[in-house]
Image (tube, rainbow, N blue to C red):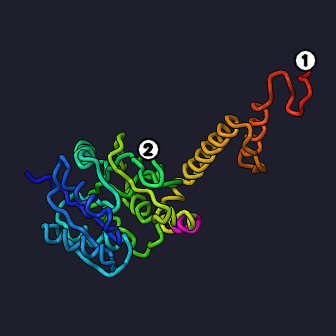
Amino acid sequence: MSTGIGVVVTSFRQAPWLRQAVASVRAQTLVPDELVVVDDGSDDDESLAVLDELDRAGVRVLRQENRGVSAARNAGIRALRAPLVAVLDGDDRWAPTFLARAHAALAERPEIVAASSWLLLHGVTDGLVRPPGGTAVDFLHRNACPASALLRRERWAAAGGYDEQMRSGFEDWDLFLAMLSQGGRIEVVADALVEYRTAPASANVRSMEQRLELVGHLVDKHRALYERHVREAVLGLEATSIARLDAWERLLVADPHLPVGEPSYGDGGMAAAVRIASRRTPAGHAPDGGPHLP
């Protein structure tokens, strides 16, 4: 029975993990109708050997010169016919129920334009990450959905696909903003169904080095959306700042040996430093060591 789902796995010099990514697609409880692997110009012998192996095993493999992950995803989606398309990076994996859970979200609610899940990190660091998803306003101050997601093909097309000029990162955030600009929401399943590989040289880590520039590009490109919701965007950034200050404050209170450092001014940093000093002070004594006055 047709599921109406096609899957694109993109790869660039990811031979050690590409087999695992493809195997995780094939192990889905909801089997996709189509699967294509798009190689973005790998030139190392190991990657070429793995691609040949997949080709011989009946996996459709497209090869292109190195043009970036956006171009690879677009090429893969254009090669599919399914109305729902899912993308997966070649160094990541899906839990067996990823497609079933994401598909259920889209099938039950027509306003859902894409669906993904929480992330289970592995590699140089382990942990659970819980992106919240949401409407356009929830994506103004940060990306609220993993890159690995199941998309409605018509909304991908209406958004113009992935921006192939964005080769430094945030291309998925850009697409989500474009898809949501006309309404709808993105659902994130409250379960860790995407196994995300962490590495020091990953594209996600490198993009943080250019974060201000990349966010500036998003604001310029989606200016009308930001102008309509400037209040929500600013308050979203403020909420993030408050949460990070609170985490910093809790960390320093828990370990009195950690230096507070120079407090920032005008963003709540100075107030946090005062609270830290007060909570570190033994009961009955003022922060300067003298007794409290009655």
Quadrant into which the C terminus falls:
top right
Residue 41, labelled with which disc?
none
Asked if the stretch drawn in magenta spans residue 213, the answer is yes
Question: Furthest-top residue in view?
Answer: 294
Q: Earlier in the sequence, mark 2 or mark 1?
A: 2
CA distance for labels 2 and 1: 48 Å
**In screen coordinates, is 227 left or right of 4?**
right
Depth check, front residue: 60 or 216: 60
**In screen coordinates, is 239 left or right of 172?**
right
Magenta region, residue range: 212-217
Q: Callout 1 environment at 10 Å: few (<14), some (14 to 19), or many (20+)?
A: few
- Residue 134 at what x, y percent from top left? 41, 47
- Residue 88 at what x, y percent from top left? 31, 60
| Disc 2 secondary structure class | strand
Residue that appears at 32% across and 46% down = 193
* Residue denoted by label 2: 128
- The three-letter code of the residue at mark 2 reads Leu
Q: Are marks 2 and 1 in contact (CB under 8 Å)?
A: no
Q: Is residue 86 visible?
A: yes
Q: Is residue 223 visible?
A: no
- Residue 95 at what x, y percent from top left? 28, 47
* Residue denoted by label 1: 294
- Residue 27 at what x, y percent from top left? 19, 51
Q: Callout 2 environment at 10 Å: few (<14), some (14 to 19), or many (20+)?
A: some
